[in-house]
Amino acid sequence: MRRYGKNPDEDDIRVRPNRKGNRPRTSIRPKHEDAAEGMVLTVDRGRLTCLVDGRAVLAMKARELGRKAAVVGDRVAIVGDLSGKKDTLARIVRIEPRTSVLRRTADDDDPYERVIVANADQLAIVTALADPEPRPRLIDRCLVAAYDAGLEPLLVLTKSDLAPPDKLLETYDALGMPYVVTSRQELEDGTATGRVMELLAGRITAFVGHSGVGKTTLVNTLVPEERRRVTGHVNAVTGRGRHTTTSALALPLSGVDGWVIDTPGVRSFGLAHVDPSRVIKAFPDLEPGTEGCPRACSHDEPDCALDAWVAEGHADPARLYSLRRLLASREGHDVD
């Protein structure tokens, strides 16, 4: 039996009543061409603090974005109340294309990857020379993540008053990676600020490091007023204080063009999202030695050319050990 006639008009079509009384769903989404541009500074319990025309504006993600989440460093389009006043809330309606994405997983066998920051172009790997002891394996993992994301690495060594930096710097000398060495006294009196600023100027730099290495202390010396201004805005809305870095926070550098993004201290840096074949890119001192490797070499087998390459003195054996340790952990093997 036909429900409608050959040429039904609107009166012929039965419409199911909407019990909720709201508007029917549509696949047509507003373009929000008049939306303001902003940058995500921090994310706290589903609320995002964004910089819009020099003001810290609190916003939430629009429902139309679905599961797509904005992260610190994202360039976004925002509508609504953009005054930045207390108890106001705007909406993020669009996330602009990203130039880079820094990711990590909790462990090497964790399928869920976490986006740390977006649109950074430099990764500052902060490591203490003592208290806590330096962890070259964590540095190597951060290097893998940096090269995979297309970020340039920067090595920042702190607490040089407790131990000399020579041995650790020698390990990474072949990479030609820029570095800066600071002491606790230099961070307290600000004498190291200028040296660090030179390496950050004109860049968007994400800071990563193990808890207790002085990462947040260093960031505070670079942008003391900005941290208070942004976190103060968040606290006024949530009513809760934050005394340690529990979420990433983007801050503009004082006096020069550039941004720093302080991230929470990490205990591990999983690389489940990185293809094992790309791990070698984080070891440019070893990569030339792979030219003699058999096809599809895992770099951890009897015929691997890297053994002879290192034995001939072209690279530090500790670097080859670190590479193979990373590859073994990616495969889920016990590396402890």
Image (cartoon, grey):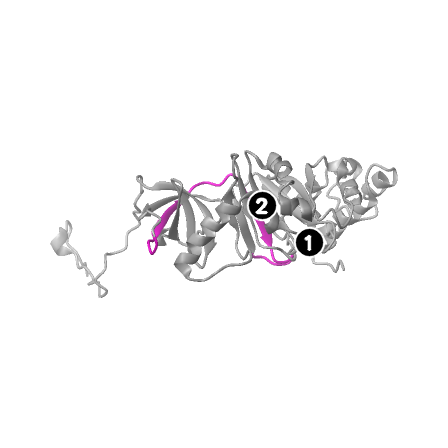
Residue 275 in view here: no
Label 2 secondary element: helix
Label 1 secondary element: helix
| Amino acid on which the number 1 mark rests in the picture | Arg
Residue 233 in the image: x percent, y percent?
A: 42, 53
The quarter holding residue 101 reads: top right
The label nearer to you, 2 versus 1, is 2
Residue holding disc 1:
330
Seen in the image, is 297 located left or right of residue 229?
right
Marks 2,1: beta carbons within 8 A: no
Residue 132 in the image: x percent, y percent?
A: 72, 56
Residue 88 in the magenta stretch? The answer is yes
Residue 66 in view here: yes
Residue holding disc 2:
221
Which residue: 58% across, 45% down?
Answer: 221
The number of numbered badges drawn on the structure is: 2
Seen in the image, is 2 located left or right of residue 46?
left
Residues 300 and 207: in front is: 207
Q: Which residues are magenta?
A: 86-112
Which residue: 52% across, 55% down?
Answer: 247
